[in-house]
């Protein structure tokens, strides 16, 4: 009964949000014939800003996956006006925090004691509040500076409710094939996994061990004795978040160094670890002027299936262009056995991907540095994303991989770094094996 | 129909009794301010608490219905006859438990200076959470009490004459908390009805809490937090004006 009550509550809030937006769009549509083109455009922008603000405020209150969706949308700079993107970007680290009493009650329900009793000192105001929990600075009784992540109560149930609702709302999209059930399932799995902090602590330990060859990457250390499913205690990682870092006016040299570091980090994870830190929103990267990168929040990690990496490597090597059997293998990995490689939409998407790689990652020697500040790159990337979406080129296996990749591109673009991406990709890319059947 | 009449009669007499008890209580409070408790009163109080502690342990083990007054008196180390001097029935014992709970709540809130400055949703959350923490060790007993309180003839019923004093004390306390929020213009003036609404809300939360099997009663925490935020939000936006 209670979960139903909560579901109804959340559904009502979302319905209100939808109704509010629809209402204001309706008002806009009604006024439209009476406005000239200039007024029309101004009104549309004002409406966009107003709605973006409303969406951000409502999503913040709802937290959970709906807020995650907003975060993901804020990274899709190609889909929205800059006003909307700016508002949604506010979601990345600013959910309304739990008040002190709720935070303590939640902590106590996990440890049986208040945080002030467990730690030497504890900062009651959260440093950051995100979609699933909030982070407090603290010092352990041994004097170590730590970040304590505390989860919102019953967030797992809220996520399940939201996905039930998203399935209902997205029924039409699923019927037309624009939103596959397997993709929704994969997204749900990823977000639900983020609610298990014990799983996250295992991810941190795995990445800390395996990213050791990249000396410029800093990963926190888990304090297992102070962690459980709803509370995660980690060592503090130094560095500034993207926005604050850019305010310090880093030189082009530092930007390039960090850009190269981010790219190396991505390809190392992909080709060597075959596992990805798959939550690439800017709040999860901490930058320093010495070029080092702090990586935090390992809730969403994707361990890739073995056949995915050689398949992805094929986008870079483009051997499939002259090899029909290889082409068929790629399509089988991406879509499973039910989609024919001969389908025109599939061929269209693959050609579009090839054209994109030919343009920005040419097979010529030696490869040149990619100007990420060049708006042309982001424009073409956005066009490619739109084409793939339009042609239903969506694969659950590639969902988190493409999310991470586009997140990295957004970071590099924000940094305005110049990065020899092709060279770095080739450096880490293993000899490409045939895709196993 | 007869139930309605009974209900009406009972409600009417409750209201009259409430006023009388309220007046009597105020006089007693004034008296007690001047006259400190004697040694005899303190001893009586101690014995009552000893009986309650023994009873709660037995209730936890055997349930409310499975515990006899004989067992309670034996456990408390007093004669069965003495037990009846203090508590006529097990329901009187349960009422004493809730009196202590309310007393503890009011005293605790008075000391929480930080909380008194907090926004209303946090205050109400803290108050209800404190109540839940108090009853948490006696979940089964609370469940049994809850079902008994639904029977009109029970002393534990919110309509019984015996429970009025306790009910009024709680409502008066909540009313004060809400009045502070009204004064600070956190919410519009909602008057007495606000205290009744919080009282009913608390009963709903206890019902949810009793059925909540999630770890650390997480779902109840979430329900409490979200519904209080939502209710305060609605009040602030003026949706109260009906």
Image (cartoon, rainbow, N blue to C red):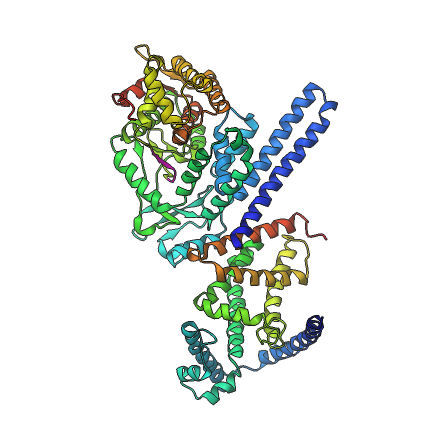
**In the depicted structure, whether residue B22 falls above or below residue A409:** below
Q: Tell me the quadrant of the picture where the N terminus of chain B can be found.
A: bottom right
Q: Where is residue A421 shown, x and y percent of the image?
A: 35, 19
| Residue closer to the observer: B113 or A269 | A269
Confirm whether residue A95 shows in the render. no
Image check: B200 left or right of A285? right
Classify residue A133 as left or right of residue A298. Answer: right
Residue at 50% in and 28% down? A178
* Residue ID at (48%, 82%): B42
- Residue at horizontal 32%, vertical 18%? A325
Q: Is residue A146 above or below residue A69?
A: below
**Residue B44, image x, y percentages:** 49, 84
Using the image as rendered, state which of residue A374 and residue A378 is in the foreground: A378
Counting from the top left corner in percent of width and height, residue A122 is at: 40, 51
Q: Quadrant of residue A285?
A: top left
Residue B137, image x and y in percent?
43, 67
Q: Is residue A432 left or right of residue A111?
A: left
Asked if residue A118 is among those painted magenta in the image, a careful observer would answer no
Determine whether A77 is above or below A96 in the image. Answer: above
Look at the image and tell me whether residue B153 can be seen. Answer: yes
**Magenta span:** A299-303
Q: How many marks?
A: 0
Question: Can you name the residue that lies furthest to the right here?
Answer: A34
Q: Main secondary structure of the magenta part?
A: strand
């Amino acid at each position: 009964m209670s979960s139903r009550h909560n579901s109804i509550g959340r559904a009502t809030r979302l319905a209100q949000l939808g109704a509010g937006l629809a209402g204001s769009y309706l008002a806009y549509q009604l006024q439209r014939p009476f406005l000239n083109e200039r007024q029309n455009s101004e009104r549309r922008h004002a409406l966009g800003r107003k709605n973006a603000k409303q969406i951000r405020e409502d999503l913040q209150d709802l937290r959970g996956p709906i807020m995650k969706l907003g975060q993901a949308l804020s990274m899709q700079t190609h889909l929205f006006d800059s006003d909307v993107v700016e508002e949604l970007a506010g979601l990345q680290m600013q959910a309304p925090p739990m008040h002190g009493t709720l935070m303590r009650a939640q902590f106590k329900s996990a440890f049986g004691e208040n945080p002030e009793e467990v730690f030497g000192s504890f900062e009651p105001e959260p440093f950051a509040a995100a979609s699933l929990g909030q982070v407090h600075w603290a010092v352990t009784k041994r004097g170590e500076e730590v970040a304590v992540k505390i989860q919102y109560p019953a967030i797992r149930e809220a996520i399940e409710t939201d996905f039930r609702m998203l399935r209902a709302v997205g029924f039409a999209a699923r019927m037309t094939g624009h939103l596959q059930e397997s993709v929704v399932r994969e997204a749900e799995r990823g977000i639900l996994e983020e609610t298990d902090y014990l799983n996250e602590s295992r991810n941190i330990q795995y990445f800390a061990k395996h990213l050791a060859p990249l000396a410029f990457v800093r990963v926190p250390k888990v304090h297992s004795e102070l962690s459980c499913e709803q509370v995660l205690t980690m060592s503090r990682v130094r560095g500034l978040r993207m926005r604050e870092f850019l305010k310090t006016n880093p030189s082009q040299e530092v930007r390039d160094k960090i850009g190269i570091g981010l790219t190396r980090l991505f390809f190392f994870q992909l080709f060597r670890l075959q596992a990805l830190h798959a939550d690439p929103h800017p709040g999860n990267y901490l930058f320093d002027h010495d070029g080092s990168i702090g990586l935090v929040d390992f809730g969403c990690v994707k361990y890739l299936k073995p056949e995915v990496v050689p398949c992805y490597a094929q986008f870079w090597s483009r051997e499939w262009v002259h090899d029909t059997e290889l082409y068929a293998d790629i399509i089988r990995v991406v879509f499973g056995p039910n989609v024919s490689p001969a389908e025109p939409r599939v061929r269209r998407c693959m050609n579009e991907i090839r054209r994109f790689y030919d343009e920005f990652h040419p097979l010529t020697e030696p490869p040149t540095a990619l100007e990420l500040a060049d708006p042309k790159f982001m424009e073409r990337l956005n066009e490619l994303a739109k084409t793939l979406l339009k042609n239903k080129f969506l694969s659950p296996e590639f969902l988190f991989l493409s999310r991470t990749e586009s997140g990295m591109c957004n970071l590099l673009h924000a940094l305005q770094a110049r990065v020899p991406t092709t060279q770095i990709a080739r450096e880490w890319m293993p000899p490409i094996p045939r895709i196993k059947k | 129909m007869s139930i309605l009449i009974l209900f009406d009669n009972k409600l009417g007499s409750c209201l009259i009794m409430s006023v009388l008890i309220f007046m009597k209580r105020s006089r007693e409070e004034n008296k007690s301010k001047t006259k400190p408790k004697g040694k005899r009163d303190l001893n009586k109080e101690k014995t009552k608490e000893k009986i309650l502690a023994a009873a709660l342990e037995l209730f936890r083990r055997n349930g409310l219905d499975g515990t006899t007054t004989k067992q309670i008196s034996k456990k408390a180390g007093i004669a069965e006859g003495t037990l009846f001097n203090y508590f006529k029935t097990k329901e009187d014992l349960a009422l004493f438990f809730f009196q202590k709970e309310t007393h503890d709540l009011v005293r605790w809130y008075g000391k929480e200076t930080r909380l008194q400055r907090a926004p209303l949703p946090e205050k109400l959350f803290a108050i209800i959470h404190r109540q839940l923490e108090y009853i948490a060790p006696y979940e089964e007993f609370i469940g049994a009490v809850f079902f008994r309180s639904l029977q009109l003839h029970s002393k534990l019923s919110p309509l019984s004459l015996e429970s009025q004093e306790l009910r009024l004390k709680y409502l008066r306390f909540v009313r004060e908390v809400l009045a502070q929020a009204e004064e600070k213009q956190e919410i519009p003036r909602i008057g007495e009805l606000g205290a009744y609404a919080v009282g009913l809300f608390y009963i709903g939360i206890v019902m949810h809490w009793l059925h909540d099997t999630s770890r650390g009663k997480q779902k109840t925490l979430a329900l409490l937090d979200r519904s209080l935020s939502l209710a305060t939000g609605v009040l602030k936006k003026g949706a109260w004006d009906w």
